[in-house]
Image: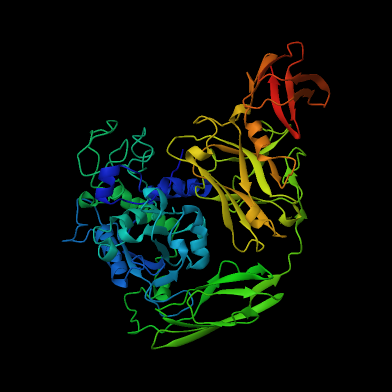
C-alpha cells in the first residue's frame, strides 16, 4: 500500500485559472513511520467508541517575516482560528455549515508557552526564511518550535516556490517536522488574506489530523481500504477545480458524483463546506491513538486553553534569542535571531568577546576574533514591561587550522565509503548517499542517492568534503564533477545543490543549483535509472572568489522530491592538469552500442581533433587493446574477447579518463 502525504487547499481564482498543484502534501512527508500510523488510524476508526466529547487543540503561530505585509496581525490570525472552528464544528449560520458533520474538534490559540509564560499564541521572527523553500523547513523549527505533543505548530511565510500555498505533516511523522507551513495571504480571511475564505488552513489541518485528499490513489479498488481510506467519500480520479459537478469514478455503488463540497479536494473555497462521518472517525482515531496528549485536560490547563483560564489583560514581554550558527571559526560572524515573546520593540544586546560588544538592533551580526566560549545577554522591552536573559557559553569560537592542499580528487574507486576525509549527512536516518558499482565514469564506482524509493520528501542528504586550502592552488581553482540523473515523472524533480562555507560550516553560500531540465541527463522513467556513458554531464564551478581562503568546506546536496537516482563521480578541485576545454572534450566522448557484443564505435565530438590514445583493460588491469586514433569516429572490434566488464581509457594531452564497456 502506498501512503502519500500532502498539504494545502487553494485559492479559487488561482486554481481555476492555472490548475497547478497548490497542495504540497503529496511530496513532503511519506515514510515507514507514516505507513505504520496509517494502519493505526484505520484500525482505530473501525473500533472507535466515541463519547462525542469536544477535543480542543492548543495552537501556536510562528510568523516569519521581514517587516512587510507578511507580518500579519493577531486579528488575521484569530480569523483563521475562527474558520477552523466553523468548519470542523459545522457551526450553524457560518460558511462551514454544509451537508457534513461536526468533527468534534476545536482550536484555541495558546495562552501559556512551554515555559509557563503568558502568551497570545503568536511568535514573530524577523528572518529571510520567510521566503520559504521546503528543504529549509528544519531551519524554521530550529529557530522556533513548541513541543508538538502540546501544541499544533503553524508557520506563516511570505512565499513558497511552485505555486504552493502550504503543506502539512501527517500523524506519526518525525516530531521535528510536525506542523503546518502556510503562505500569509491564505491564512485567515481578513488582512492580507481578505480574498480568501481561510480554507487553506482547514485543508492543511485535515492532513495534520490524518485525512488524505479525496482523490488519493485515484479511484482505487475498494472504497474503504483504498483511495482516501474513507468509506463515505465517493472515489475521485483526479483533483477537482472550481465548483463544476463531476463523476470521475464509477466503481462505487450506488455511483455517486465526486464530493466537490469536501474540504479535502482542490475545489474552490466557495463550494467547500463539509467533512463526512468517515472523515470524522479518522480524525478522532488520530487524536485518540497518535495525538493523545495534546487535547487532554491536563494539557489544556498547561497551555491556557482550558475554558476556565483567565489570562491577564496584558502579557509581559519575555526575552529570548537563538542563532543557527553559534559555533564558528575565529574571525567569523554569528547571526543572532530575536525570538522574544509579546511584541518586544526595543533590544539591548551584550556580547562578551564580540565586535560590536553591544547592539540595539533586533537581529545583530557579531564578529569574534578570539578563541573561546562567550556569554550573550539580551534585555528587551515592549514599552510597558522589561525582561532579560543571559546564555552562558552560547558562542563557541575555534581555530580550524589550514585545510588540505590542492588538488583534491575523489573517484570512489577504492570501494571504501565514505572515503577518508569525506563525511555523509543523512538527517532522517533513511535512504542516503551510497556506493554504486552499476554506473560510473571512473572504472569501478560512483555514489548515488535513490530518490525513487526515498519517500521523506524535502529531506537534504549531503556529501561533505574535507577542509581545503584553496590558496594552495597556483592558478584559478575550479571544482569539477560528473553527474547523471533522470526523473520518475515529468512533474517532480529532485534538486542538486553545491554549497561552500568559509566559516567552518556556520554559514553557506550556494555555488551551484540544478533541477528539472538543468539536472536531467537521462529519460524520464519509473524504473531505476542506470546511466550509460552518454548520460553523464560535467559540472564546472569557478572558485576564484575563494582563491585566498585557507579553510573551505564544500558540500554536495541532494533534495528528495520523488524523482529517480542521482549519481556523482570524479570530484576534482584545483586540478591544474584539467582545463575547462579538456573537460568539455570529455563530454563529447560517446561509446556505442554499450552494452555490446564486441564491436563498437568511439566518437569524439569536438572541433580540434588532437592525437588520442585509446587503451582497453580487463577488470584485473590487463591491457587488452591499444589504439592510436586521429579520426572523430573509431571502430573497435573485440569480438574474440570473453564477455564481461572492461574499461576504455581515454588519453588526450594531459586529460585521462576511463569509461566502462559491457561486452555480452
Is 94 left or right of 408, judged from the image as shown?
A: left
Q: In this view, does 123 lie above or below 269?
A: below
Identity of the residue drawn at 41% across and 74% down: 303
Is 636 left or right of 524, judged from the image as shown?
A: right
Q: Which residue lies furthest to the top in this view?
A: 640
Residue 425 location (% of width, % of height): 64, 52
Residue 659 location (% of width, % of height): 70, 28
- Does residue 232 show up? no
Q: Residue furthest right?
A: 622
In the image, 530 versus 513, the foreground residue is 513
- Does residue 615 show up? yes
Q: In this view, does 610 lie above or below 378?
A: above
Residue 334 location (% of width, % of height): 59, 71
Q: Residue furthest front?
A: 608
In the image, 637 versus 70, the foreground residue is 637
Is 460 left or right of 384, judged from the image as shown?
A: right
Q: Residue furthest left?
A: 93
Identity of the residue drawn at 42% across and 80% down: 344
User: The C terminus appears in which quarter of the rendering?
Assistant: top right
Tag count in the figure? 0
Residue 160 location (% of width, % of height): 40, 54
Identity of the residue drawn at 49% across and 34% down: 488
Color style of the picture: rainbow
Amino acid at each position: 500500500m502506498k501512503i502519500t502525504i500532502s498539504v494545502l487547499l487553494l485559492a479559487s481564482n488561482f486554481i481555476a485559472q492555472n490548475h497547478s498543484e497548490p497542495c504540497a502534501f503529496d511530496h513532503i512527508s511519506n515514510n515507514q513511520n507514516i505507513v505504520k500510523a496509517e494502519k493505526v488510524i484505520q484500525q482505530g476508526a473501525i473500533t472507535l467508541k466515541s463519547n462525542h466529547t469536544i477535543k480542543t487543540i492548543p495552537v501556536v503561530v510562528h510568523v516569519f517575516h521581514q517587516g512587510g505585509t507578511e507580518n500579519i496581525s493577531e486579528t488575521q490570525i484569530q480569523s483563521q482560528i475562527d474558520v477552523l472552528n466553523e468548519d470542523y464544528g459545522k457551526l450553524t449560520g457560518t460558511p462551514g455549515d454544509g451537508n457534513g458533520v461536526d468533527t468534534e474538534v476545536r482550536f484555541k490559540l495558546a495562552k501559556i508557552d512551554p515555559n509557563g509564560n503568558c502568551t497570545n499564541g503568536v511568535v514573530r521572527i524577523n528572518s529571510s526564511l520567510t521566503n520559504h523553500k521546503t528543504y529549509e523547513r528544519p531551519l524554521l523549527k530550529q529557530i522556533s518550535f513548541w513541543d508538538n505533543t502540546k501544541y499544533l505548530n503553524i508557520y506563516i511565510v511570505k512565499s513558497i516556490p511552485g505555486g504552493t500555498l502550504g503543506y502539512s505533516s501527517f500523524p506519526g511523522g518525525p516530531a521535528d517536522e510536525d506542523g503546518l507551513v502556510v503562505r500569509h495571504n491564505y491564512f485567515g480571511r481578513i488582512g492580507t488574506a481578505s480574498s480568501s475564505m481561510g480554507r487553506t488552513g482547514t485543508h492543511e489541518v485535515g492532513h495534520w489530523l490524518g485525512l488524505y485528499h479525496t482523490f488519493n490513489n485515484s479511484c482505487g479498488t475498494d472504497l474503504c481500504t483504498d483511495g482516501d481510506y474513507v468509506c463515505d467519500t465517493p472515489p475521485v480520479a483526479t483533483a477537482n477545480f472550481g465548483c463544476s459537478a463531476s463523476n470521475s469514478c464509477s466503481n462505487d455503488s450506488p455511483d455517486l458524483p465526486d464530493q466537490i463540497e469536501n474540504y479535502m479536494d482542490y475545489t474552490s473555497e466557495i463550494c467547500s463546506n463539509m467533512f463526512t462521518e468517515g472523515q470524522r472517525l479518522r480524525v478522532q482515531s488520530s487524536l485518540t491513538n497518535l495525538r493523545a496528549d495534546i487535547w487532554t485536560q491536563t494539557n489544556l490547563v498547561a497551555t491556557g486553553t482550558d475554558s476556565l483560564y483567565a489570562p491577564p489583560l496584558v502579557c509581559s514581554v519575555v526575552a529570548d534569542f537563538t542563532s543557527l550558527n553559534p559555533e564558528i571559526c575565529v574571525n567569523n560572524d554569528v547571526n543572532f535571531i530575536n525570538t522574544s515573546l509579546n511584541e518586544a520593540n526595543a533590544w539591548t544586546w551584550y556580547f562578551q568577546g564580540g565586535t560590536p560588544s553591544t547592539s540595539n538592533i533586533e537581529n545583530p551580526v557579531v564578529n569574534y576574533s578570539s578563541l573561546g566560549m562567550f556569554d550573550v545577554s539580551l534585555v528587551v522591552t515592549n514599552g510597558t514591561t522589561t525582561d532579560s536573559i543571559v546564555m552562558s557559553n552560547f558562542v563557541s569560537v575555534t581555530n580550524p587550522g589550514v585545510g588540505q592542499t590542492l588538488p583534491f580528487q575523489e573517484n570512489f574507486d577504492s570501494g571504501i565509503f565514505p572515503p577518508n576525509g569525506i563525511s555523509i549527512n543523512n538527517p532522517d536516518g533513511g535512504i542516503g548517499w551510497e556506493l554504486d558499482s552499476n554506473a560510473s565514469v571512473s572504472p569501478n564506482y560512483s555514489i548515488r542517492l535513490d530518490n525513487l524509493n526515498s519517500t521523506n520528501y524535502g529531506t537534504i542528504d549531503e556529501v561533505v568534503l574535507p577542509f581545503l586550502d584553496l590558496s594552495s592552488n597556483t592558478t584559478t581553482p575550479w571544482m569539477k564533477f560528473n553527474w547523471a540523473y533522470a526523473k520518475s515523472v515529468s512533474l517532480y524533480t529532485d534538486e542538486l545543490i553545491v554549497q561552500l562555507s568559509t566559516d567552518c560550516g556556520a554559514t553557506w553560500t550556494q555555488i551551484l543549483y540544478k533541477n528539472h531540465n538543468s539536472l536531467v541527463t537521462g529519460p524520464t522513467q519509473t524504473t531505476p535509472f542506470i546511466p550509460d556513458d552518454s548520460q553523464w554531464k560535467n559540472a564546472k564551478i569557478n572558485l576564484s572568489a575563494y582563491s585566498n581562503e585557507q579553510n573551505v568546506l564544500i558540500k554536495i546536496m541532494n533534495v528528495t522530491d520523488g524523482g529517480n537516482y542521482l549519481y556523482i563521480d570524479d570530484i576534482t578541485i584545483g586540478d591544474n592538469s584539467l582545463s575547462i576545454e579538456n573537460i568539455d572534450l570529455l563530454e563529447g566522448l560517446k561509446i556505442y552500442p554499450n552494452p555490446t557484443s564486441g564491436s563498437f564505435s568511439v566518437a569524439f565530438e569536438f572541433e580540434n581533433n588532437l592525437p588520442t590514445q585509446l587503451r582497453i583493460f580487463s577488470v584485473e588491469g590487463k591491457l587488452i587493446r591499444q589504439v592510436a586514433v586521429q579520426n572523430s569516429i573509431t571502430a573497435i572490434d573485440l569480438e574474440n574477447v570473453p564477455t564481461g566488464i572492461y574499461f576504455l581509457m581515454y588519453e588526450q594531452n594531459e586529460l585521462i579518463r576511463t569509461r566502462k564497456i559491457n561486452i555480452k
